[in-house]
Image: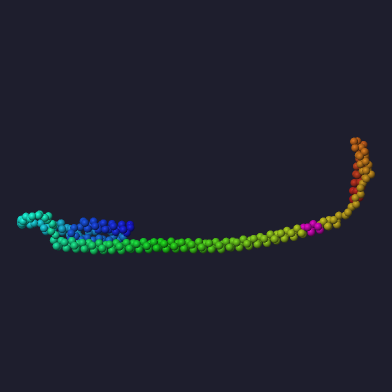
Amino acid sequence: MKKEQYIKIFNNNMRQSAEKLGPGQQWTLQHNSDPKHTAEVLSEDVLQRMRDASQTPVSNKENPGQQAKPQAPSARTQPSKPQQSPQFGSAASDNREELKRRYEREQAIIQEELARIARKEREAARQDITRAVQRERLQTLQESEKAKQLGKQLEKKEAELKALDAFYREQIAQLEKRNLDHFKTSVEQFHAAANRSEANIKPRCMEPVCTNLQAQILLCYRENRNQTLRCSDLAKEYMQCIDAAKKNLLVNRG
């Protein structure tokens, strides 16, 4: 509840309580421990005075043994005003003063309570802001530390990748060198084996065989292109000559 509404409700309650009380009555306000509520309580003195007022006869009533005195007629009849005793007026004035003092005290209590509530709310708001700022600072610090840690991890990972790259490059260079050396060795071994094979193989002189029959057959085929059967005897003789040459070669090798 806002401060203005709280004061307005309190003033209305004070006014209604003052209208209910009669002259000579006293009243008090009892402050509740809850700052949002107040309770109006009549004191024992007020209750006792209310009971006494109901039992005391009115002072301005006429006694039964007395007779009313005749009044002289006047030119203009004026309306009679209620007579108010000095004691009654003094009591009413005292009650008004007491009521005013109590009202002022209660107003001071309300102002003090409202100020206390405002201070409490300001303190709570300040604490909330302080906690929010602390949380924000802590979160910022944590994010900064996390960023630093991630940066260190990234640098470490980059160093590891560079080391692996250098290692793989070295391994590839070694493999290439090993393959090149192996290829050179294989080529040298191949040439050495070829040289040894050539040294072991003896050269042979090849002489043509049945050259006369071969020439006769060629001539016969040229002359008898459409009648090749006429050259069949020469061809048979040439085959026999070839077989005889093969047999002679095998005999010589053996």
**Image: magenta residue range:** 186-192
Q: Which of 158 and 175 is in front in this view?
A: 158
Q: Which color scheme does this rendered protein use?
A: rainbow
**Tag count in the figure?**
0
Q: Left or right of 241: which side holds 162? A: left
**Is 225 in the magenta?**
no
Which quadrant of the structure image shows residue 6?
bottom left
Q: 217 above or below 45?
A: above
Return the x and y of residue 48 as percentages of the image width and height. Answer: 18, 59
Which quadrant of the structure image shows residue 125?
bottom left
Q: Is residue 1 visible?
A: yes
Look at 15% across and 61% down and name the residue there: 88
Q: For the stretch drawn in magenta, what is the main secondary structure?
A: helix
Q: Can residue 251 be seen in this view?
A: no
Return the x and y of residue 157 as percentages of the image width and height. Answer: 59, 61
Q: Nearer the viewer, residue 236 or 95?
A: 95
Look at 15% across and 58% down and name the residue there: 53
Look at 28% across and 57% down and name the residue there: 9
Return the x and y of residue 130 as percentages of the image width and height. Answer: 42, 63
Look at 50% across and 61% down and name the residue there: 143
Q: Left or right of 164: which side holds 111? A: left
Return the x and y of residue 135 as percentages of the image width and height. Answer: 45, 62
